Amino acid sequence: MSHLKTTIGSAAFIAAGMMIAPTATMAADIGFVLAGPDVFYATGAEVFETLAEQNGHRVSFANSEYSPSKELANVEDFIARGVDVIVLLSANAEAGTQAAQRAKDAGIPIFFQSALPTPEGYQIPDGIVSGNWIAMGKTVGLYVGENYPGENVALIEGFYGQGTTELIRKGFEEGVAESGGGNEVVLNASGNWNRKDGLAVAQDFIASQKDFKVIYAMNEEMMAGTIQAIEEAGKQGEYALFSDNGKEIGWQWMKDGVMEGTVANPPTLEGDIIFQMVQAHLDGKDYPRHVYNTQPWLTADNLDGAIPWDVEDYFARKASGEIVIDLFALAEVDEIVTWDSSGASN
């Protein structure tokens, strides 16, 4: 394993909205494994890499292309290379748990970003920054139940087996039930988090002749495909559209009245938080082991406070003090809901 090197940071960096002067830090070789070629993952990784390099660390990337076997191979490669830290954005909870155990057995700290390990492997990682997936789906479910009672719903879901989709679905169903709206999910399929598959699923839903009023696509990439399918079918304005993640393109859809609402989960903020966690570990500080990303409900009425995905814009707002995020001010999470890859949870 490589040895951490004591260095002086080459430049000041921004943390918690304040300028921090360069201090002696432990320079580390960090292996970062991405789940797949998704803009959400790439954006968070770019923020992480920027902050890491400002603090004298070196980051190497690998992409699992949504393959559990490739995910394990990527982690094993970083173990063999003797990196000091691994950050894993897992494509599959089972594979992620196995990978985390192998890293721990090798004495290499491993941190999960966004996706979770299995409930059985929850205690293995040294740190986790994720969305509150149950709350994300519940926010949409409550809104739909209260504003569109009795209307049927079509779900365009994310990548199965990752855990994220399964928990969002559970939260949505809880929200609908709590609202008393009586909405029924009549169609659901995976759009694999991307625009092309979201388009294909939406086209199939529209062609199915099923009766539904609400479409919930679990990220803006799949929603972009959904909107294209609706436009191609000449059905603009016939559906109430909802999404997640809060990407800038979604802000414009809401301003234009195309989409009604989305639950933000900005990857820029997430990349910042996971960096702070890794840095705290390298500095030997105690830190909250699992925290949630910020997830506000966005509509056309409250976009002024939305967190940008654009990395340059994010850092500019952070430098001005408009965005303040401090790992140590976030509430620590100590458990996750159990679930399985078929979507069942308890």
Image (tube, rainbow, N blue to C red):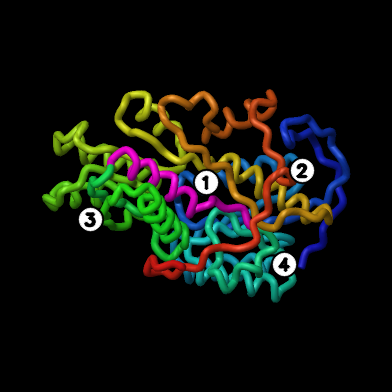
Q: Is-magenta flag for residue 230?
A: no
**Front in this rendered view, residue 190 or 62:** 190
Quarter of the picture holding the N terminus: bottom right
Q: Nearer the viewer, residue 308 or 80?
A: 308
The disc label shown at residue 55, or none = 2
Q: Amino acid at mark 1?
A: Ala
Question: What is the CA distance from the residue labelled 2 to the residue labelled 1?
Answer: 20 Å
Q: Which residue is under mark 3?
A: 186
Is 13 left, or right, of 97 in this rendering? right
- Residue at which label 4 appears: 108
Q: Residue drawn at (57%, 45%), measured in percent from left and top?
A: 44
The count of marks equals 4
- The Cα–Cα distance between marks 2 and 4, rounded to whole angstroms, is 20 Å
The mark that comes first in sequence, 3 or 4, is 4
Going by the numbered disc 3, the residue's amino acid type is Val
Q: Secondary structure at mark 3?
A: strand
**In terms of sequence position, does the residue under pointer 3 or pointer 1 come before the other?**
1
Residue at left offset 53%, top offset 51%: 132
What is the magenta range? 128-148
The CA distance from mark 3 to mark 1 is 33 Å
Q: Earlier in the sequence, mark 2 or mark 4?
A: 2
Q: Is residue 53 above or below residue 298?
A: below
